[in-house]
Image (cartoon, grey):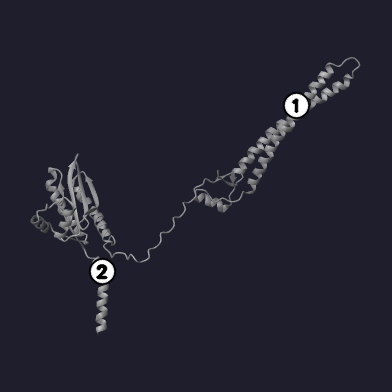
Amino acid sequence: MARKIAAIFILMCSLFPLFAQNQAIRIVVFDLTAKSPDVQADSSMLSEMLRNEFIKTGRFEVVSREQTTKIMSETEFQTNGFTTANDAIQVGKLLNVKRAIVGSVGTLGGTVFVTVQLFDLETGRFVTAEDMQAPTMKDIVSRMKATVGILADASYRLEGGSAQGGAAADASAPQPKKPAAAPPPSNAPPRGRPAALNWVGYGSMAIGLGAVATGYFYFDAKAAKAYDDAVAANAAYANAGAGADFAALWTAYTNDYGKIKPLTDARLYCYIGGGVLAASGAVLAILRFPSPARAQAGKAAGWQIAALPSGLLVSLSY
C-alpha cells in the first residue's frame, strides 16, 4: 500500500509541471487611451469588448476593470497604463499578472485607428503590437477577435508553449533535422547524347564548309590562272610575227579561255551548295530529336514540342 501511495505521489509530481504550463496566464487589459475627444465614449466600450474577447479565448485569467481600478487608484497609477518600464514591473507585482494589454484609439481623416500592444510585465518590454484601421467603430469591433487571437498566440509563444497553450517542448529532446532544400525544377527536358540526325547535321556542316573552302581556295585560283593564261595567249597571238604558227597560238588561247567558265561555274556551285549544306546542317545540329520519354518530359516541363511534316517530334534546346 505504501508503495502505491509513493508511486502516485511521484506521478503527480512529474505531471505537475505540465499542469502548471497549461494554466491560464493572468493578464490585465488597461483602458484604451482616447487620442481625440470624439472617441472618448467609444474608447471605454472598446476596452470592455477587448477584455471580453480575451476572456472568450479561455486561455487567460483577465483581471476585472473594477479590481484594476481599485488597486491602481490606491497606488496612484493611472488606469490606462504606465509610463516607464519600472512602473510596468511594479504594476505587474501589484496586480499579480504577467502580461498587460495597452493601446489607444483615435480618428484621423474620417478613419478610426486602434493600436493594441502586448506588454511583458516581468521583463518590462513590449512583445508585439497590432493596428486596426476602419471607417467605422463597427468595423473595428468585427476585427477585434482576430487581433486578440494574434496577441494571445504571441503571449503563449513567450511562455514557451504552443499557440494553443500546450506544454512547452522539451529542449533536450532531439529536434528533427530540416530537410535539405530540393533543387529547383529545370525548365528543360533531360539532355541526352546527340541523335543520328544531329550527327547528319554535323556532317552536313563539315561538308558544306569544305565545299565553300574548295570553291574559294581551289576553283577560284584555277579560274584566275586560266584567265591569266588566256590573256597571255591572246597577247602572244596578237604580237606574233611573220612565220609564226598562228593556228597553234589560237588553239592555246581558245583552250585557256574555255577553261574559265567551267572553273567559275564550279566555284559558284561550291559556294551555293556548300552554303545550303552548312545552313541545313546547322539546323539539324542544334535541334534535339527526343525519344518518346524525353518528349513527354519536355511537355511536362512546359516545352513547346513541334511536329515536322515528316511526323518527327523535335524540340528547340538552344
Name the mark on residue 171. Answer: none
Residue 35, image quadrant: top left
Residue at 66 percent of width and 38 percent of height = 277
- First along the sequence among labels 2 and 1: 2
Above or below 159: residue 32: above
Q: Crowdedness of circle 2 by 10 Å Cα count: few (<14), some, many (20+)?
A: few
The secondary element bearing badge 1 is classed as helix
- Quadrant where the N terminus sits is bottom left
In this image, 211 relative to 6: left or right?
right
Using the image as rendered, state which of residue 150 and residue 1 is in the foreground: 1
Amino acid type of the residue that numbered disc 1 sits on in the rendered structure: Ala
Residue at image mark 2: 17
For discs 2 and 1, the disc positioned in front in the rendered view? 2
Q: Position of residue 140 (x, y in %)?
A: 20, 48
Residue at 80 percent of width and 23 percent of height = 230
Q: Using the numbered discs, state the Cα–Cα distance from disc 2 to disc 1 in whole angstroms.
A: 105 Å
Residue at image mark 1: 224
Using the image as rendered, state which of residue 145 and residue 129 is in the foreground: 129
Using the image as rendered, state which of residue 81 and residue 271 is in the foreground: 81
Q: Position of residue 13 (x, y in %)?
A: 25, 73
How many marks can you see?
Answer: 2
Amino acid type of the residue that numbered disc 2 sits on in the rendered structure: Pro
Above or below 260: residue 194: below
- Quadrant where the C terminus sits is top right
Question: Disc 2, disc 1: CB below 8 Å?
Answer: no
Above or below 314: residue 63: below
Extreme-right residue of the structure: 243
Residue 221, image quadrant: top right
Q: Crowdedness of circle 1 by 10 Å Cα count: few (<14), some, many (20+)?
A: some
